[in-house]
Image (tube, rainbow, N blue to C red):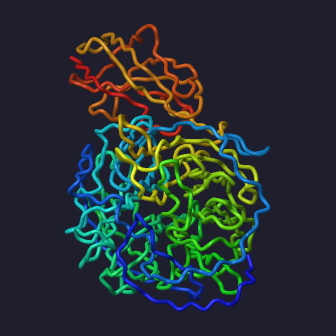
Amino acid sequence: MRSTSLTRVFTLFVVAVVVDLSLASVGIARRASTQPSVTGTSGQLTGTSETLTVGQAVNPRQIHPEDPNPELESERERQPADPPDKPYKPTEGPTSDGTTGAGGFAPLKMFRNAVSQPVAGGAVQEPTAANGGNVILATGNTWATLSSDDGQTWPATLALNPGKKPAKGDFACCDQLAYSVERGGHTLFFWLIQDDCAGIACGVGNPTKENALTIRVFQNQQKLLAGQACQIVLRPSQFPAIKKTAWFDFNKISSTNKFLYLSTDVHTLKGTSLGVEIFRFPLDKLDEMHHGHCKPPRHMAWHLPNANSMAPVEHASSTMYFAEHINNSAKGDELRIYSVDDGSTKLSNVDRDVNNFAPNTRGAGRCPSPDGDDPCKRFNSNQTVGFRSGNTVGWLWTAPQDSQFAFPQVRVAVFRTGSLKSVTEHAIYSPVFAWTYPAVGVNSRGDVGVIVYSMGGGQFPSPHAFIVKDPSNWSSIGLHKLATGVASMPGKKTPTANVWGDYASVHAYAGCPNTFLATAWSIQKSGARSVSEDRVAWFGDPKDGCADLAVTGAIAAPGRLAVGGTLSIVDVAKNLGSGSSAATETRYYLSKDATKSPGDVLIKGGTAVPALVPDGQFSPTHATSLTIPTIAPGTYHLLACANDVIPIVAETTLGNNCFSNQSITVS
């Protein structure tokens, strides 16, 4: 929005300060300096094969113990705050925290809303999740875990230790990210971990060594469940444009059709900003990496020395877009939008005017909870998230209260791809509480899924989800609450720490691509104390749910018999998915291992399974009788496989259809 304020003259001065998250006192001025187009430079990294111990939870010695975590996530340059621009006066109405909005809102059904980490243990939770088939990788700042049943359960046997084999001399710190890309028949998983500065928290204390970002690449869900990763380590000093011992922080990850993108803030060890580094890796070459053959592909890197935190878009297609906040002396607040095509190495940018918002610095937000804690004091404008839907791109961020808004609010700005002309802007706000901390994703149809938090106004922070069918129209939002917070901070007594997690994640649900996989967190009670509780949710339009069929148990007798003998079997078929299934048939195999493969011997006959609603299951009242076919004597695994007759009924994944826990000896 154009400003009538006088031309701004900034005198920048740099003061090295010690990070104080409890006061959240570090300010960020939204820069107006021109960032020229930058051509990427190519480079080669080394990679290693790593075997992780699945079922090994966090080792406190390998996770930095400070709480809240010591991440900086903002520049250390103490710049003068932006002068207030002429405030934007909303013409749109406030957004309710109820489950219905104005007429025409997009319907939403919560297919699954599971607790992935009931006692996450930190004051700053930043959960993310990614899935492929029936496997979900979920992370927080100090933990990671897997689910092998579409998020129904999160057993301790599938816990992962982020600090397992970190970069040499380092400890895992924070800012973990889970991400996955569908690759036509399998899913490529990425697990990014930020280490601290060789055992010292970056940004506090007096570190003398740089930190690292560790990218663990899993070729498919089976490799992920086995803990078999390729590991790539990124250190600031490896990249010529930085040429300093420094540290990376506040990482964001996304992809186009051909490339994986990673952006990260860069700081000197004294805390001054060195700008932003953007990395690009070809997906085809990453797909060729596998445990035992972990040579990383050549990468491209762009260094933007004058940039603030960059927000890439989800669902980018063939062009990646990023945005950062700047302030123009004549126009007021703007987004500087960067773009790079898959066929180019040139990162170009344009500046686009957006509705003004109050200076967005740490400590500026106000949304006190009933216990006196104020989580809005943590946010700033580097917590921006982006999306691409069809021929539009857009970004969401949290803005502080001002003369027009009684509480912090979420701003939305949408632009046309190509021209990057403005399509619409919207404020998600309330006169009685704050809306904050958005996360955004896009499904295969182009619908936009969003997580936001209600905070303050007599209530504790609580996450909500909604869907926007048309990204050019945000006027009708219907919200669904994922959890109701009961405090603002974990601990026996709630301290006044004034912090919150900086981000969550929303992605299209792999295998059911018109629905969404999302993460969120809240403070809940565990006995007499409050704890951080992280959730993984699966939501979408009610008509877009998908089935997921599996055999979850089977018993057969006798355990030893001859060719031509009769085997009796009873099994349970279950629909683990979010949509109803058609009728199917379960069939049975004798196999040399517990995995179905072309060499397995089919036992003729099967069990007819009726249509199943979500979470519905079926077990016949009488055992199915099968005749053992001609087969060489020996001991075989008995496989019971759901949905096994062609044509196969549509479901999210076929990877979990078979069950085997019993051997049959044929004499």
Q: Position of residue 230 (x, y in %)?
A: 30, 60
Can you say which quadrant of the picture contains the N terminus? bottom right
Which picture quadrant has residue 257?
A: bottom right
Residue 66 placement, left or right of 408: left
Vertical position of residue 402 compared to residue 35: above or below: above
Left or right, 205 with reference to 264: left
Residue depicted at 38% across the width and 79% down the height: 267
Residue 500: x percent and y percent?
Answer: 46, 57
Q: Nearer the viewer, residue 367 or 150?
A: 367
Please name whichever residue, 6 or 560, is drawn nearer the observer in this view of the structure: 6
Q: Residue at x 23, y 48 (%)?
A: 53
Q: Relative to the observer, which residue lies in front, 343 or 513?
A: 513
Residue at position x 35%, y 82% in the image = 268
Instruction: State the image coordinates of residue 288 (x, y, percent, origin top left).
Output: 37, 61
**Residue 307 placement (x, y as % from top left):** 51, 81
Q: Quadrant of the C terminus?
A: top left
Q: How many marks?
A: 0
- State left or right for residue 218 relative to residue 580: left
Which residue is depicted at the point 25% across and 15% down?
Answer: 559
Depicted 249 relative to depicted 241: above or below: above
**262 or 567: nearer the viewer:** 262
Of all residues, the one furthest to the top in this rendering is 622
Residue 639, compared with residue 212, is above or below; it is above
Residue 496 occupies quadrant: bottom left
